[in-house]
Amino acid sequence: MEGLKGYLSNLYGGEVNIIRLTPLGVTGIKPEEALKGYGYGTALSIEFSVDGVHRKVVFNTVRPGGFGHERMADRAAILIWQGEAFNTLPRHVRAIDVGVITRKGSLRSLEDPLEFFILTEMAEGLEYYRDLDRIKEAGDLSDLDLRRCKALAGYLAEIHSVKGCDPGLYERRIRELVGHSECIFGLTDSYPTGLEYIGARELSAIEKRCIDWRWRLKPLTHRLSMVHGDYHPWNIIFTGDTEFKLLDRSRGEWGEPADDVTALAVNYLFYALQQAGELDGPFKVLWETFFEDYLKATGDRELLQVVQPFFCWRALVIASPTWYPNLPLDVRRKLLNFARNILEVSRFDYHEVNGLLED
């Protein structure tokens, strides 16, 4: 009660006297009783006076659960949007403020937000893609290159061993793999019309096959694991020989391990295509080392039955002219062939990749 009173007093610039708190649809409840029975997602009517003026407002949150409301950040995004959008529609009730309930039970205003930001520590080191650039130019591997590859596989095995227990969250992440704006449908939309190497018919066919894969993966909720979500060479900073820091964890704490595995592995294929036109040479060694170390550490052979749509997504990213405008045409074509062909493989054989690069 005191937290609510203090928040309203600060918001309205005067001493607030709370008269009545009532869950909407319920009357005749004392303020203390109303607060005790209040749960997230229940709208609460608040009557109060400030400087002799009687006011009545509604306090609301979003109930945790399905439909994209699982994470606190999901619910915050909804309320932040409502705080702006309610006041741009004629006849809609006005949004007065958007705030946050702290862990200590106080209420704080976000005070008319325009944009949000995050402040992080600085990782001093070199991005992993610089190693891959050097290997592409030199054409060979060092012992350190192999040890770093093994360290990256071992790290994923470690975090993926931490399992989640929310089946609906796994289903959500698989649904987002197909429909999220940063994932498959978002990537297919990023391809301009009039391209000589892919058009609407081919992109539509990819989308339809990915929907089939969604329904194939949806029941595999036991696979829900701790993930990074964007584990690629630009987000990996080596701070020592095999010590590294990570940047830009994406799209949630929990998901499918294949997300992280494919995000890194596809870059070994990508660099091999630029160097040799197929998966061969030093990048083939890194590709096979990465898969073998990961599978040995996890024992997760089921992974080979679920990587397909994740590889499709990552290949669509790299082949997109939006993300890689200067990619050689033959490399782009082979990546798109890989994106299509891998969706037809029920069990992925990481030793047999080059056949998937052909038309």
Image (spheres, rainbow, N blue to C red):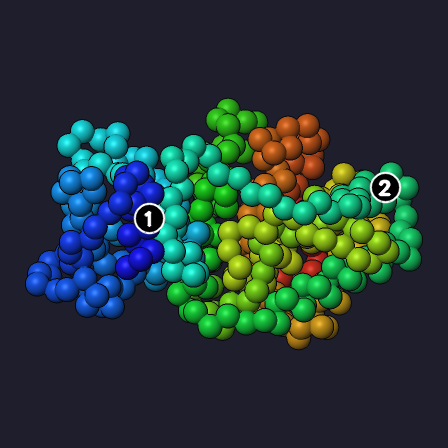
What count of labels does the image hold?
Answer: 2
Looking at the picture, tell me which residue is in the foreground, 325 or 60: 60
Where's residue 70, x and y in %? 40, 59
Where's residue 54, x and y in %? 14, 42
Disc 1 target residue: 7
Where's residue 212, x and y in %? 43, 56
Asked whether residue 6 is in view, the answer is: yes
Where's residue 254, x and y in %? 52, 62
- Amino acid type, label 1: Tyr
Looking at the picture, tell me which residue is in the foreground, 334 or 86: 86
Asked whether residue 344 is in view, the answer is: no
When asked about the image quadrant of residue 152, the answer is: bottom right
Given the current orientation, which residue lies at the most extreme bottom position? Answer: 299
When asked about the image quadrant of residue 20, the answer is: bottom left
How busy is the neighbourhood of tag 1: few (under 14 within 10 Å), some, or many (20 plus)? Answer: some
Q: Which mark is residue 134?
A: 2
Question: Which of the marked residues, 2 or 1, is nearer the chain's N terminus?
Answer: 1
